[in-house]
């Protein structure tokens, strides 16, 4: 309790400060206040709140394709679209959920025409994902992904900072990794 005050014998205010991030609760125990007839209060309802000082981070950013090649640090595939999984450290809100153009702002890509999310919140600023997890599909650009010379084409994707936010309004951090895909014709 940081401060405590009263405006009358029936109204009191307290300011509390959380010690760590996480779910907090406040309850006034029974008999904490006694009236003039020496009768104590009943236990109060419990107030819950989440104290959050951390930006949502990208905990996992990987493809649904088999493990990346350790020599090239990339995924080899002939699959289109390419499955990509993103897990944030907490639930996130995405402005424009359901709007493909706004959702594409979450990603920085090359060699891709667009990214779609396979499960999208129905309204803007609704919690998105389950524990911050969602599945995206990377759609490679047609020109780069039709390497007629029998070679391969490339596409990359990275999560961009400040495109999603947690429930208290803290912007996401960018993914540390950029996923690279080689299309083997």
Image (cartoon, grey):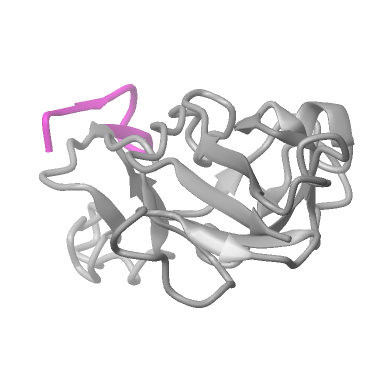
Total labels: the figure holds 0
| Up/down of 123 relative to 104, above or below | below
Residue 87 located within the stretch drawn in magenta: no
Residue pictured at 24% horizontal, 61% vertical: 37
The quadrant the N terminus occupies is top left
Residue sitting at the far front: 149
Residue pictured at 57% horizontal, 34% vertical: 164
28 horizontally vs 159: left or right: left
Judging depth in this view, the residue of 140 and 174 nearest the camera is: 140
| Up/down of 156 relative to 36, above or below | above
Judging depth in this view, the residue of 111 and 95 nearest the camera is: 111
Judging depth in this view, the residue of 157 and 130 nearest the camera is: 157
Residue pictured at 72% horizontal, 66% vertical: 78
Residue sitting at the far bottom: 66
Residue 130: x %, y % from top left: 59, 67
On the image, which quarter does residue 115 sit in?
top right
Residue 86: x %, y % from top left: 53, 56
Residue pictured at 27% horizontal, 34% vertical: 53
Residue 166: x %, y % from top left: 50, 40
118 horizontally vs 99: left or right: left
The quadrant the C terminus occupies is bottom right
Residue 24: x %, y % from top left: 29, 56
Residue 8 located within the stretch drawn in magenta: yes
Judging depth in this view, the residue of 85 and 68 nearest the camera is: 68
Question: Magenta stretch?
Answer: 1-13
């Amino acid at each position: 309790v940081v401060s405590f005050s009263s405006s009358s014998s029936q109204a009191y205010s307290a300011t509390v400060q959380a010690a760590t991030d996480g779910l907090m609760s406040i309850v006034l125990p029974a008999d904490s206040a006694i009236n003039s007839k020496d009768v104590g209060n009943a236990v109060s309802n419990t107030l819950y709140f989440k104290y959050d000082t951390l930006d949502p981070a990208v905990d996992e950013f990987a493809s649904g394709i088999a493990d990346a090649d350790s020599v090239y640090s990339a995924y080899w595939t002939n699959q289109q679209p390419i499955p990509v999984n993103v897990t944030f450290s907490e639930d996130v809100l995405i402005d424009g959920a359901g709007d493909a153009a706004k959702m594409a702002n979450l990603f920085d890509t090359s060699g891709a025409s667009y990214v779609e999310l396979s499960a999208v919140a129905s309204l803007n600023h609704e919690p998105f994902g389950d524990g911050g997890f969602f599945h995206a599909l990377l759609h490679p650009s047609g020109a780069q992904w039709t390497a007629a010379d029998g070679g391969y084409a490339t596409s990359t994707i990275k999560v961009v900072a400040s495109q999603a936010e947690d429930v208290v309004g803290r912007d996401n951090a960018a993914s540390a990794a950029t996923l690279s895909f080689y299309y083997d014709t």
